[in-house]
Structure formats: structure tokens, C-alpha cells
Image (cartoon, rainbow, N blue to C red):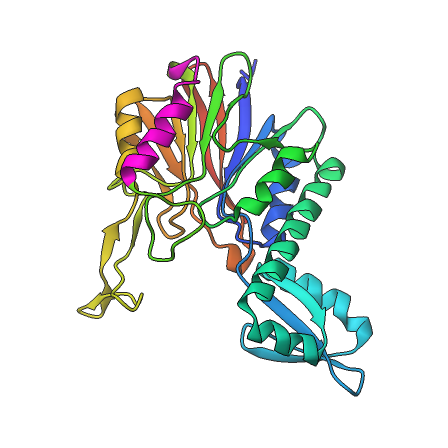
Amino acid sequence: MIEVAKVRFLFATDLHGSEAVWRKFLNSVKLFNLDALVLSGDMTGKLIIPIVKESDGRYKSTLLGQEYVLTENQISEYSKKVRFTGYYPYVTTPEEAQELRASEDRREALFEKLMVDSVRMWFDLIPERVPKNVRVIISPGNDDKLAIDEVIRSHPSVIYGESNVIAFDEEHEVACCAWSNPTPWDSPRECEEDELYQRLEKIVSEVKHLQTAVFCFHCPPHNSGLDTAPQLDKDLRPVIIGGSPVMIPVGSTAVRKIIEEYQPFLGLHGHIHESAGYVKIGRTMCLNPGSEYSEGILRSFLVEIDGTKIKRLQKVEG
């Protein structure tokens, strides 16, 4: 008789607005007969792609360096292509486009609206793809603006993870944190290591069963092999020596300290796209699936857990 794990879930992170990757994430539920989906942040995109209506009735837009001239009937398909790339399409006029270029406040307000609308649309896809008994646990990441939190909290198809401890079942809990240590980009959810440690300790204090707990912390532990990224100079360009970029650990010392002190069963991380893998810190198995969102590729881990045993740990990519 085949032994079935108590909880089977798929973990992914750093989708950065790619609707193609989000749809693959949802579709994995029936493919792998999952009990839960867990997403650890950085789910929103980074750019608005204007689709500008010209005086001749056609529309012009530029995506990934390529200029497109569209008829009105082509806008829907082109907008889908933009969303699948991880950006937000926006149909506008030359006058409004000029006003947006001139006003940072207007750009930010529009970006926030498109971002929130996109997240809500993503969540609205869940009922048709995910059975009601499957838990969809969503925690933001350091790049995600605070405006999306209310959408996550209020949507009936998802469970809001940030700063909460969510029960997988009567035995396993998931403690979530979106924040990271400081980055060169001054992202919405980053702070100094001392403050991050205090945030993490407050969340962990609510965990009832540390021996079977899962820490879903967006930032990976420092010097773990899951946090290796190119070193940047003062102009945010990679430091090159001998023709190769210099790679350094950029993860959080606070996250590492918390994991070493509390030794949860499992650590789920992201943040550093190019540092996929898994590693043990003491008894804690830590994972980072990495990210190739710009290519429309889902990178994830399929995990089966039963008590304090990992019955299955498998990379799922496609």
C-alpha cells in the first residue's frame, strides 16, 4: 500500500507579475493532487506598458524593445502578451501619456491601481482551477507594495499569510514574513537586521509546534547558498573581475539567526532568483526555488510532509 503524505503542497515565489507563471501555479493543484499552494511574495509586476491611441485610430506600444502598431481588435491579445511577460498594459491617449510622464504622483497612483486590479483578477481565477478544499496561502514579498495586502486579506479564495501563523493541518503550521534586510533598491518592505529579527521573533512566538513548523520567510538566510547574488557597485552595476561577476551572500543574518535558534522543520524562501536549491541549517531543510518569471517559467518545489518527515522533495519547473 502506498503511504500518502499528510500534507502535499507546491511552493513558489517571485512571480513578479507574470500571469503565465501564476496560471501554471494554479494548474499544478490538479496535476499533483495538492492539499495546498504556498506563494512567498514578490507577486506584483514592475512596469506599466502604455498602449497609445494615435490620430489615425491605430495604437502604438513598445514591449521588450520591440515596437508594435495595433488595431483595436488586436489590443486584447497584445494586452495578454504584456501580462504574461509580467507588466501591466494600459490603453491611453498621447495627452494622458504625456501627463503621466510629467507627474511621478500620477504614475504611482496609476501603477498602484493596475497592480491591485491585477492581483484581484489573479485571485478570481482560483475558484475555476482550485478545489475548495485546497488552501491557497499568499504572503507578499519585499517588492510588493502595501496596497495589495487588503486584496489578499479580503479575497475569499486565499489565506493572508503575512505576519501570521497559518495551520496546514492539526500538526503543521506555516509562519510567514514578507520583509527583507536592506537592498540597493529601497523596496517597500525592508528594514535593518535588528528590526527584522524582532519582526520574526514576534511571528515565531505564535507557533505552537516548532518541531513540525514551516517558516515561510521571503528572504533567505545569510551565507546559506540560497542567497548568492552579484555584487553591485555604487551605480548598481555588477562588479566584474577576470571577466566574471563577483558573487556574494546577500541574505538576512536575522533570518539565519532565527532558524538556528528555533530549528523549524522546514524553511521556504525566495528573493534571490539566481540562487535556487536546498540546504540544511541544523535540522532545518531550507528551500529556494529561484525564479525565471520573465521567461514564463514556473520554478517551484513539490513537498510532501508527514509529521517530522519529508516524504517528497522535488523540483517542479516548466
Q: Judge whether residue 230 can be spotted in this image.
A: yes
Question: Residue 299: image x %, image y %?
Answer: 49, 46
Looking at the image, which is closer to me, 301 or 77? 77
Residue at the location (50% across, 26% down)? 164
Q: Identify the residue at horizontal 74%, vertical 36% (top origin).
A: 127
Q: Residue at x 65, y 55 (%)?
A: 113
- Residue 200 on the magenta span: yes
x, y percentage for residue 60?
68, 80
**Quadrant for the N terminus in the image:** top right
49 above or below 170?
A: below
Instruction: From the viewer's perspective, tell me whether residue 123 is left or right of residue 305.
Output: right
Q: Is residue 199 magenta?
A: yes
Q: Residue furthest left?
A: 242
The span picked out in magenta is: 193-210
Looking at the image, residue 244 lies above or below residue 162: below
Q: Quadrant of residue 81?
A: bottom right
Residue found 63% across the figure and 53% down from its top? 19
